[in-house]
Image (spheres, grey):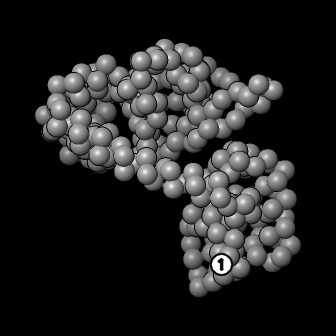
Amino acid sequence: MIEPSREVLDFPCMEKDTAQYEAVRRHYLFSGLEDGVFDALVAHVSVETFDKGDVLFHRGDDARDFYYVETGQIELSLISPDGQKKTVEVISHGRTFAEAIVFMEEGKYPVSAEALSDSVVYRIPNDRYRALLRNDSNACMRLLSDVCRHLHERVREIERLTIQNARSRLSSYLIDHIVEVDDDEATVRLDLPKHIIASRLSITPETLSRLLRAMSGDGILTVDDRLIFVHSLARLRPYD
């Protein structure tokens, strides 16, 4: 992995009344904060750019910050005992990562983070965020409510991935990434490399290729690099 050629941008990262400010303000980690409290936090947030392949941090590094993704994609990964990289999650626009460390005594990152594409992220200091919550019990309760709602959504996603078989998981993934629909046909755009998609679906890249070939052979879809043309949504959906 490539060490980061990060750049701290020389302008206010979230000026009030901008789309960036409002997007972060709506995130469940910040929506419960009073306006003045949130603005005080924003003063300590920095915006950084990372090129594709840059490493934001390694597993075991001191965890002093968490991050909000403005643009791009960040891969969180672990190295298995046999030396293979396992993709834990891919974080894209509008999502945060490494925030769990804020609430843990362990001050080390449990995974590594690498930019899958050119990315812009906001770096939020853990100590500043913790200090705000310690001084605002109402914000803590609102945050707890929002976090619980978020966890329920993630549990449902985990249940879906656990219960469904590999072909069903792939079908669900394709349906979730439809960019255009025309009656019973659709166009799917794969926004991640296929080996990352396979890792997210808990299958091997070979299994992913085999499933796509089988669906293509059945006349359900045609694969053209990162575009997939679905010829029959009705035939794809039974596997969802």
Q: Residue at x 79, y 63 (%)?
A: 212
**Residue 84 shows in this picture:** yes
Depicted 215 relative to depicted 46: above or below: below
Q: Tell whether 39 sits left or right of 210.
A: left
Q: Residue at x 54, y 15 (%)?
A: 61
The crowding category of the residue bearing disc 1, from other C-alpha atoms within 10 Å (few below 14, some 14 to 19, many at least 20), is: some
Q: Position of residue 215 (x, y in %)?
A: 80, 70
Q: Residue at x 74, y 58 (%)?
A: 166
Q: Which residue is mark 1?
A: 233
Depicted 97 relative to depicted 219: above or below: above
* Quadrant occupied by the N terminus: top right
Q: Position of residue 101 (x, y in %)?
A: 43, 25
Q: Residue flagged by tag 1: what amino acid is it? A: Leu
Q: Tell whether 43 sits left or right of 150.
A: left
* Quadrant occupied by the C terminus: bottom right
Q: Tell whether 46 sits left or right of 80.
A: left
Depicted 219 relative to depicted 50: above or below: below
Q: Tell whether 233 sits left or right of 156.
A: right
> Which residue occupies the extreme top position in the image?
62
Q: Residue at x 82, y 53 (%)?
A: 207
How many marks do you count on the picture? 1
**Residue 116 shows in this picture:** no
Q: Nearer the viewer, residue 239 or 156?
A: 156
Q: Nearer the viewer, residue 208 or 121?
A: 208
Q: Position of residue 41 (x, y in %)?
A: 24, 28
